[in-house]
């Protein structure tokens, strides 16, 4: 985290995990309870700033069994190309259930970071299950937090923890659909 804070404007490559052990996730929808949790009227912003039940005073009851926490594989990562991303960095793994798809977002996090996704590339230096590497440009999270927050509504949803084994970025990247968090 210190590296990201101290290197705003720098481009770096990040690995994104493996199929069955993804490192990047998006929220496809926002729970209604997050909107009323405060301190703002935006459910997504309340998650980022830890409203009541979303991490304030170690109360994280609204972060268990969260619908539509989607692990990103090659197609979804590629769709982020050119996008500004605000991310909560967790200290440990996010557990996902697939039927229905939901995640447990409880646990220690290290803070919020922001970056622009420059490109997504196939990893060829590891196993067949390795997800792509992503070239990012580090942004100032404090400045980006004031921008409009959007939900990645057409993120590809994996069928299971192992299917599809989507590890190669597509030649043609589908357009991303973003919906403002209201």
Image (tube, rainbow, N blue to C red):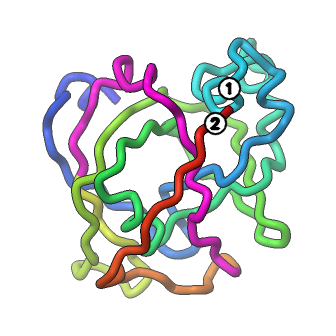
Task: Out of 109 and 170, give the one closest to the viewer.
Answer: 170
Residue 72 drawn above or below residue 52: below
Q: Position of residue 68 (x, y in %)?
A: 73, 57
- Mark 2 Cα-neighbour bin, 10 Å: few <14, some 14–19, many ≥20: some
| Element marked by disc 1 | loop
Residue at 41 percent of width and 80 percent of height:
167
Q: Quadrant of the C terminus?
A: top right
Side of 32 relative to 163 (left or right): right
Dividing the picture into quadrants, the one containing residue 160 is bottom right
Marks 1,2: beta carbons within 8 A: yes
Looking at this view, name the residue that lies furthest to the left.
10
Magenta part of the chain: 136-159
Task: Out of 105 and 51, give the one closest to the viewer.
Answer: 51
Q: Position of residue 80 (x, y in %)?
A: 39, 58
Q: Which mark is residue 155?
A: none
Task: Out of 83 and 64, give the one closest to the viewer.
Answer: 83
Side of 23 relative to 63 (left or right): left
Residue hosting label 2 = 181
Residue at 51 percent of width and 36 percent of height:
88
Residue hosting label 1 = 42
Side of 114 relative to 64 (left or right): left
Dividing the picture into quadrants, the one containing residue 175 is bottom left
Residue at 63 percent of width and 76 percent of height:
158
Residue at 84 percent of width and 72 percent of height:
99
| Element marked by disc 2 | loop
């Amino acid at each position: 985290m210190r590296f990201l804070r101290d290197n705003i404007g720098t481009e770096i490559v990040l690995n994104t995990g493996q199929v069955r052990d993804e490192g990047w996730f998006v929220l496809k929808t926002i729970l209604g309870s997050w909107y009323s949790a405060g301190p703002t009227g935006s459910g997504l912003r309340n998650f980022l700033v830890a409203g009541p039940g979303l991490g304030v005073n170690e109360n994280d009851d609204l972060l268990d069994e969260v619908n539509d926490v989607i692990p990103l594989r090659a197609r979804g990562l590629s769709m982020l190309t050119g996008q500004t991303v605000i991310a909560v960095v967790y200290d440990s793994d996010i557990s996902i259930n697939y039927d229905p798809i939901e995640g447990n977002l409880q646990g220690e996090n290290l803070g919020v970071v922001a970056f622009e996704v420059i490109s997504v590339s196939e990893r060829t230096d590891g196993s067949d299950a390795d997800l792509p590497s992503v070239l990012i440009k580090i942004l100032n999270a404090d400045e980006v937090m004031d921008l409009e927050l959007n939900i990645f509504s057409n993120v590809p949803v994996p069928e299971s923890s192992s299917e599809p084994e989507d590890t190669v970025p597509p030649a043609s990247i589908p357009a991303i659909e973003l919906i403002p968090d209201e």
